Image: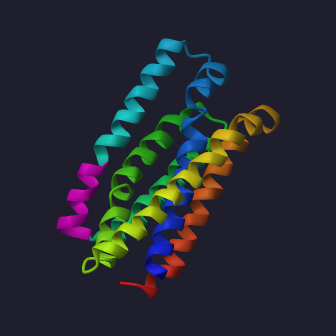
Amino acid sequence: SLGVFTVCITELWERFGYYTVTALLVLFMTKEYNYTDTAAYGIFAAYTALLFITPAIGGFFADRYIGYHRSLGLGLLLMIAGYSLVALPSKEAFYPGLALVIIGTGFFKSMPYAIMGRIYQDDQTKLDKGCTFYYLAIQFGAIIPVAAGGFLARYFGWHFTFLIATIGITIGTIIFFSLRPNFK
């Protein structure tokens, strides 16, 4: 269905952005900002922990106040802003960029699951098939950045590589907002 396609392709591009940045984050901090390994891993650990905690808060707001589609869209927009800041060659923009990615992930991350559940609320068999496509989208979104991220960073620079993450999540956002009116 169009709803499943929209959710899957949006998730693919979100994962593309996430893995493009996350796969290089520690290396970036140690090489570009001269952080010690301990400091870089500490920042990475805090960043990753918050990425996994905030969806509970975002899910609460989606359930109670703003709805699943608005939450997902808000999360995408915040992540675009965050990745854009991380892509800037400015240390002052780096932490606010990571913070926006964390907040955006909070609003985004649990929404595709909720939307998939709503699309197939009456048909468990179709939900299982839809989830298979969803997990494939996650894997496809992750494989390219992990394979190509280091190459891009080495030959084109860190900030260009982070800009690619921004472009990827922007593509996913455009697809989501373009196709969202066509399904409930």
Q: Is residue 12 above or below residue 118?
A: above
Q: Nearer the viewer, residue 23 or 156?
A: 23
The residue lying furthest to the right in this view is 155
Task: Determine whether 177 is above or below 19 in the image.
Answer: below
Residues 156 and 145: in front is: 145
Q: Give the total number of marks visible in the rendering.
A: 0
Q: Position of residue 11 (x, y in %)?
A: 49, 60
Residue 170 placement, left or right of 181: right
Q: Where, by quadrant of the figure, is residue 140 drawn?
A: bottom right
In the image, what residue occupies the spot 64% across and 44% down? 145
Question: Relative to 68, does residue 2 appear above or below in the rendering?
Answer: below
Q: Which residues are magenta?
A: 55-66
Seen at 40% across and 35% down, the residue is: 48
Residue 162: image quadrant is top right
Q: Residue 155 at what x, y percent from top left?
A: 82, 35
Of all residues shown, which one is farthest toward the left? Answer: 64
Q: Is residue 85 left or right of residue 45?
A: right
Quadrant where the C terminus sits is bottom left
Compared across the picture, whether 89 is left or right of 114 comes to right
Q: Nearer the viewer, residue 35 or 11?
A: 11
Identity of the residue drawn at 61% across and 53% down: 166
Residue 129 coordinates in the image, percent (x, y)? 41, 69
| Residue that appears at 57% across and 71% down | 174
Position in image of residue 170 (x %, y %): 59, 62
